[in-house]
Amino acid sequence: MNRRLSASVLCGAAILVGSWSVLGPLRNKLPPFLGDNPSVHVMMILTVFLYIYIFAMKPQIAGKGTSDSLKAIRGSIIYIIAALFIAGAAINLLPSKLVAEYLGERAGFIAVLVGVAIGCILPACPFLSYPIVFSVYTLGAGLPGVLGMLFGSGTAFACVLACDLTYFNSKIMGLRLLLTIITALTAGILVYIVSISGSLI
Amino acid sequence: MRTLEKILGNDRSHKAVLIVAICIYIGTLAISPNVAKSCVETSFKEIQKLIIPIFVAMFLGGLMKNLITSNFVSKLFGRSGARNVFTAGVFGSIIPPCPYVAYPLISAFKDRGMTLPGFMTMLITSTMVEVPQIFAGIAILGLKMELTRILFAFLASMIVGYLFLLFTLKMEK
């Protein structure tokens, strides 16, 4: 078991290091539809390798993974595109001055509060909420504000609340909501403390 | 009609995103067609930049969902005392983030007699930490910001989880 685990870790590390060393010189030379983030390119290579490996070793799991992924894509593609359109609109419509005032580095702790509050009403699905958060980041929001949005993301979104009520009850929903908002604020405060010390990203 | 149902699904909250997008664009088009045009152009640029990484992330997420099982996780960690909060936090962090998938799993743990602090920590981390979102996060936000998000979200979840454990122990006394 240990041998298998260490072999997997070594293989993973080799793929990561190898893909990074291959992709490094290609940086900024890849077509735009592949994105501009090297970690994304590494993830793409990792996905291809992982699928090939799992198809060879456990074809059933790979088949199930593929069908699950296709189902997820089919079920959310229209909403992902809608979210990207909202992100595009946010970039053009939100005044960067306003974003900088409430979510910028100078907003201080207020940015965390505003970020968590906005995040709470964003969709729970990362493919829908992250493009919107990222568009706010490109407009000049600071890290505490952006991470506050990410921490709060989906906390009070309709589908999460509906699941709270479906699987549990209103008491658990209330407690979950309270504790999650406290957690998001705690995380935001920690980020704020670290960022004012100047050692974050 | 069935194809449309398959594409749109049954999730009303997701439909809200579509309605909001349509409303924003109709409103912007009515007030300032030029701004609406530049919004569409920016959106197409965003789609061009992000759609392939998003698809890849969804494929990787789909595979991970099938590779990591709850048995594997419960074998890996113990389930007693304060360690229960940590175990629950770790488990909550790595289960699929979608509540429709995560909640039945969490509910199963609750039914098997998991403690309230452990159960609440699992709920918090499943909503906040969401390690399977790492692929979406890397694809859209980048590696550094995604790792920072996971690190601080997990740290804060553990702090709140342990505080809640202390609170419940105090209430029991």
Image: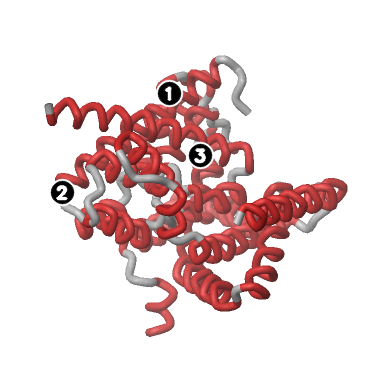
Q: Residues within 10 Å of mark 2 (few under 14, many from 20)?
A: few
Disc 2 to disc 1, C-alpha distance: 28 Å
Report the side of A174 relative to A154 (left or right).
left
**Residues beneath discs 1 and 3 located on the same chain:** no
Which mark, by number, is residue A170?
2
Left-right relation of A17 to B75: right
| Tag 3 and tag 2, C-beta contact below 8 Å | no
Residue placed at 46% from the left, 40% from the top? A150
Q: Quadrant of the C terminus of chain A?
A: top right
The percent position of residue B58, horizontal first and vertical second, equals 55, 62
Secondary-structure class at tag 1: helix
The residue lying furthest to the top in this view is A197
Distance from Cα at disc 1 to Cα at disc 3 = 15 Å
Residue highlighted by disc 3:
B150
Between B140 and B46, the one nearer to me in the picture: B140
Q: Give the mark, 2 or 1, whose residue is nearer the N terminus.
A: 2
C-alpha span from label 3 to label 2: 28 Å
Q: Is residue B86 above or below residue A4?
A: above
Chain assignment, label 1 = A
| Residue type at the position of mark 2 | Ser
- Residue A120 screen position, x and y as percent: 35, 41
Question: Which numbered disc covers residue B55?
Answer: none
**In screen coordinates, is B99 left or right of B56?**
left
- The chain identifier of the residue carrying mark 3 reads B
Residue A81 in sight in this render: no
Q: Residue visible at 48% across and 68% down? A: A72
Whether residue A80 sits left or right of residue B101 in the image: it is right
Q: Are marks 3 and 2 on the same chain?
A: no
